[in-house]
Image: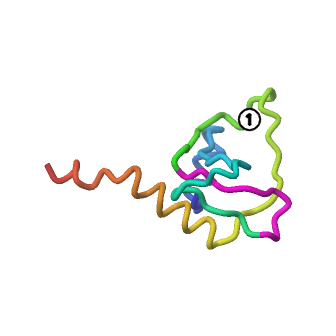
Amino acid sequence: MIVDFSIIEREEITGMMAVCPITSTQNTKSHFISLDDNHQVTGHINSLQVKTFDFTAPERNVRFIEKATLKEIGETAQIVSMSFDFSNLMTE
C-alpha cells in the first residue's frame, strides 16, 4: 500500500486500513511480490488480495512489525493499481 498524508489522515479518522496479505506458500504466482531477505517476516505479498479492516477494533490485536522496502511497495502498488483501474469507466 502506498501511504501518503491523505491516506494516513483518512485511516486516523475512519479507523480503516487497506492491506495485502503475506503468504508463505512455495507455490508462487506472477502477482506475488517476494519480500527481500532482510525482513523478519518471510514470504510473498499477495497483491491481488487487498483487504480492508478496522484496525481500532480490540479483537484485531493489530501491531506494527516492520516496513516494506520501496521496491516492494512500488511493485505491489503497481499491481493493485492495474487491478482497480477505473479510468475507462470515467470516459464513457
Image position, residue 60 (x, y; %):
77, 32
Image position, residue 49 (x, y; %):
55, 43
Question: Residue 62 falls in which quadrant of the image?
Answer: top right
- Locate the N terminus by quadrant: bottom right
- Badge 1 amino acid: Thr
Image position, residue 61 (x, y; %):
82, 35
Instruction: Left or right? Give the position of 51 relative to 40.
Output: left
Label 1 secondary element = loop
Q: Tell me if residue 40 is in the magenta stretch.
A: yes
Foreground of the two, 30 or 62: 30
Foreground of the two, 41 or 10: 41
**In this picture, is 29 found above or below 14?**
below
Question: Residue 6 falls in which quadrant of the image?
Answer: bottom right
Q: Which SS does the magenta portion mostly show?
A: loop
Q: Residue at x 51, y 48 (%)?
A: 48
Residue underneath mark 1:
56
What is the magenta range? Answer: 37-47
**In this picture, is 10 found above or below 36?**
above
Q: Residue at x 27, y 55 (%)?
A: 87
Instruction: Left or right? Give the position of 15 relative to 66.
Output: left
Going by the picture, which residue comes out furthest to the front? 27
Foreground of the two, 27 or 11: 27
Going by the picture, which residue comes out furthest to the right? 40
